[in-house]
Amino acid sequence: MLSSALAVSLAVIAIVTQDQSALRAAPRDSAPQQAVLWQGDSLEIRGEKGDFLQVYDHRRERAGYVRATQVHVQSLKPEAAPELLSVVRLMKDMSGSESLGIAYTAAYLMAVPPGAVDSEAFDALGTMAERLARRAAARQAKPAAEATAAQVEVAADYGVNIQSFERDGQVQLCYDGDAYRRVLALSKVEAQKARAALALTRHDCVATTLTPVERFAHDNWRADVLDRVELRDLPEVLKNRLHLRKAGVWAGLAYQRARRPELGQAAVQAAGQRALDELALINKSELAESDAAAYSDAAIRVGASRWAAVPQMPSQATGKLAVAISAGQPGETCVHLIDAKHDIKNPLATRCTYGIIWTASATPNRQNTALALAVQSLDSWREMWLFRQGPDGWTIDVLPPGLDMPSLGYVEFAGWVPGNTQLLVAREARQNGRYRQDFEVLNMNTLETEKQADKPNNLSLFYRWQDPLWKGQTVSVRN
């Protein structure tokens, strides 16, 4: 990760320390401006005249003059390495000056003798690069946005690659993680490795352009990176963050394994159980306030895939309503509603999907006039299918977790209310950037919400008629 300027064999360079510094054609403030310089730009020094330095900007391939007070003259000799490392340590936590910190890190890596480089500089570089990417992705006023965009260009000249891709209709910016990969290779400090693993495995930085095969390989790599970190001596906050990330990654792997029948049901169950176990390992008393959103995120991902941990047994007609599945069009699975008199060849109702049908979730009511079924269409999105018998026969309704485009959420059956007119459901989803939990009483005929609360015990019907199996397995009740 070397700047084009630093790639030149120089013993001394000038590092620009102020945004919007002018590179002028002559050593005076009234001279024409050749270019606008930003924090972190590195310049070759070719002379000095009055209050100006005569420099050459290799990035823009322009010569000119810059005020000496707007740059820092820095030696790149080996004896300067300790001083540079001290500056890097200081800049690591200075928000808003990431490109300048990256420039000093590059200078340190040029100055430090071969074989003396350890993981500390790369840890700092990754921290600053990731923070710069987050700042560039955030909404800012025009002047601040312009400065951030310019600093991203400066960072790119040092080999810091910030990738962009579209997610949910918005542009997502993420650091490619090269420095963090070096930390994993070099570091003997578990806290550094933990931070690197967390940065490399962010859910929101998984490229949306990956094919299913590429995504499966990438998520297996993410799981391996996280498992390489030894948790024993880490602070509780870092342990919690690793458990949260592992829970989300393994929940996704459970869904992806379910899409690959050749892996077998045992592999699906193992991944689903691992996701539940990681979520259960969270030390809630040590959960940082800043990690509340990450906790909700992980819980929703696990909730979407939780049926993976339960054996999916083939349904048999026992006099009650049940479901059976068969292959449909390429990539599709069809679910058939059956009973003692109607088998898979003569079902009561049929619907096909490209999602995962969790047959173990099929729950009929006492009257055998309705059945609830969990169907997972994405690794982080699970719907509920409701089979209902009406005057005109059987209908199949799909209840989504929320009204937003599918991204993160699940809805699940929570109980039948006696009388065959009401149904209990639990929903948890991220909507408009906010995490929300709802426990609802639905009208069986219209599927409209009659009552709603943020906790199940706040609804008397929920308290009395919630399904024991749901109560014992759901992750929606976790406080």
Image (cartoon, grey):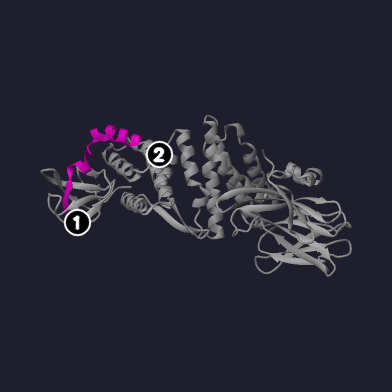
Task: Report the side of 327 relative to 170 (left or right).
Answer: right
Residue 95 in view: yes
Give x and y (percent) for residue 423.
Answer: 78, 53
Against 458, is 425 above or below?
A: below
Quadrant for residue 15, please give it: top left
Residue at 19% of width from left, 55% of height from top?
33
- According to the image, label 2 marks what residue? 123
Against 117, is 426 above or below?
A: below
The label shown at residue 23 is: none
Residue at 30% of width from left, 47% of height from top?
2
Quarter of the image that includes the C terminus: top right
| Amino acid identity at mark 1 | Gln
Q: Separation of disc 1 and disc 2 at Cα?
A: 36 Å
Residue extending farthest front: 450
Quadrant for residue 383, please give it: bottom right
Residue 266 in view: no
Q: Residues within 10 Å of mark 1 (few under 14, many from 20)?
A: some
Task: Report the side of 18 relative to 233 (left or right).
Answer: left
Q: Nearer the viewer, residue 403 or 354?
A: 403
- According to the image, label 1 marks what residue? 34
Give x and y (percent) for residue 59.
Answer: 25, 54
Give x and y (percent) for residue 175.
Answer: 42, 49
Residue 85 sits inside the magenta stretch: yes
Q: Which residues are magenta?
A: 63-90
Chain-order first, disc 1 or disc 2: 1
Residue 400 sits inside the magenta stretch: no
Q: Nearer the viewer, residue 264 or 159?
A: 159
Give x and y (percent) for residue 364.
Answer: 82, 55
Against 287, is 140 above or below?
A: below
| Amino acid identity at mark 2 | Asp
Q: Nearer the viewer, residue 14 or 311?
A: 14
